[in-house]
Amino acid sequence: MEIPLDLARTLAVVIDEGTFEAAARRLRLTPSAVSQRVKSLEQQLGRVLVVRSKPARATEAGEAVVRLARQLALLEQDALAGFGLDAASDRPVSIPLAVNADSLATWFLPALARVAERHAVVFDVHRDDQDFTAGLLESGTVMGAVTSQASPVAGCLVRPLGVMRYEAVATPAFVARRLPDGPTPTALAGAPRVDFDRRDDLQDQYLRRLGVEVEHPSRHFVPASNDFATAIKLGLGWGLLPAFQSAAELERGELVPLGGGPVDVPLYWQQWNLGSPLLDAIAHEIGAEARRELTRP
C-alpha cells in the first residue's frame, strides 16, 4: 500500500485551513475536487482521515498522513536549498511550531525573524501552555515546540533552553487595599489574583510552596500574556510575572514583590528528528535567543 503524496498534501491543506472551501481557494481547485481527493485517499487507505466539522479535524489515522505531508514539504524545501533555490522560492514552506504564551510575548519571535531573513519560510505558530505543547508534536500538528517536557516525544529530539523565572508581584495600591497586614500566605490565598486560564496553575504552585491550598480561589482570567501582565499592573489582582514583564515596574515602584521566592519553569525545545537543515537552523536561533534571555538552571 502506498500513500499518494499529492493527496496527502491536499489533506494537510484541509487541516491547516480548517474547511474544504478554504483549502480549495489555496489549492486553486473547486471544493468538490478537494473533497474527491480526500475521499479517494480514504478509500485507498481504508481509513476515515478527517472529521468533517468546522474546523475540519484529522482523525488519528489522518494525523499520521498530515505528519507525512509536512515532513515531505520540509525535506523538499531542504533539497531546494541545496540547489541554491531557497531564497528565490515564491512558495515558502510553512513550518508549524508551538510555544507557550509568555515566551511568545517576550523572547521567542526575534529568533524566527532571523530565520525568515535567510530562508523561504513562513511560520504557523500555535500558542498553548508549556505543559501541553508537546501534545501538538505527538499529533503531528507542529514540527517543533517550546515545552516543559524534558523527555523526548517519540520521533523527536530534545534540548534544554533555560528557565523562565517568575516572581509574585502586585501594585502598592492593591497591597494596601487587599493585603493591609502584609502578603502572608493566608492573606494571599484569600485575595483576588490573576490567572491566565483554567489550566494555569502557576499561582497555585506558588501558594502550595507557601503551605496554602485554595479550593475556590477568587481570580480573574486574562488569557493573553501582555494583557495578563497589564491586569496585574492595573491592580486587578496579584500574580506571577517573569522579569521581562515586571523588572522596569519593580524598579520604579509601580509593582512590589510579594516574597516567597521565585517559581522557575524549565523550558525545552523539541523537534522532529528529520535531519533537516531548515529545522536545525530554527532550533539554532531559538537556542541562541534562549541563552541570551532565559535564566540558566
Image (cartoon, helix red, strand yellow):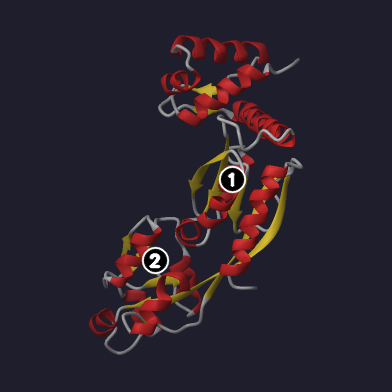
Name the residue beneath numbered marker 2: 215
Q: How many marks?
A: 2
* Front residue of 261 and 189: 261
Q: Say left or right for 75 vs 50.
A: right
| Residue neighbourhood size for the residue with mark 2, other residues' Cα within 10 Å, grouped as few (<14), some (14–19), many (≥20) | few
Q: Position of residue 137 (x, y in %)?
A: 62, 43
The answer to whether residue 9 is visible is yes
Residue at the (59%, 10%) spot, across then down:
40
Q: Position of residue 24 (x, y in %)?
A: 46, 18
| Residue neighbourhood size for the residue with mark 1, other residues' Cα within 10 Å, grouped as few (<14), some (14–19), many (≥20) | some
Image quadrant occupied by the C terminus: bottom right
The answer to whether residue 218 is visible is no
Q: Position of residue 36 (x, y in %)?
A: 53, 9
Give the amino acid type for the residue marked by disc 2 in the picture: Glu
Q: Which mark is residue 292?
A: none
Work out whether mark 2 precedes mark 1 in sequence or the reverse, and give the earlier one: 1
User: Element under label 1?
Assistant: helix
Residue at the (65%, 59%) spot, across then down:
287
Give the amino acid type for the residue marked by disc 1 in the picture: Gly
Name the residue beneath numbered marker 1: 135
User: Element under label 2?
Assistant: loop
* Front residue of 153 and 110: 110
> Could you tell me how far apart the alpha carbons at marks 2 and 1 are, in whole angstroms?
28 Å
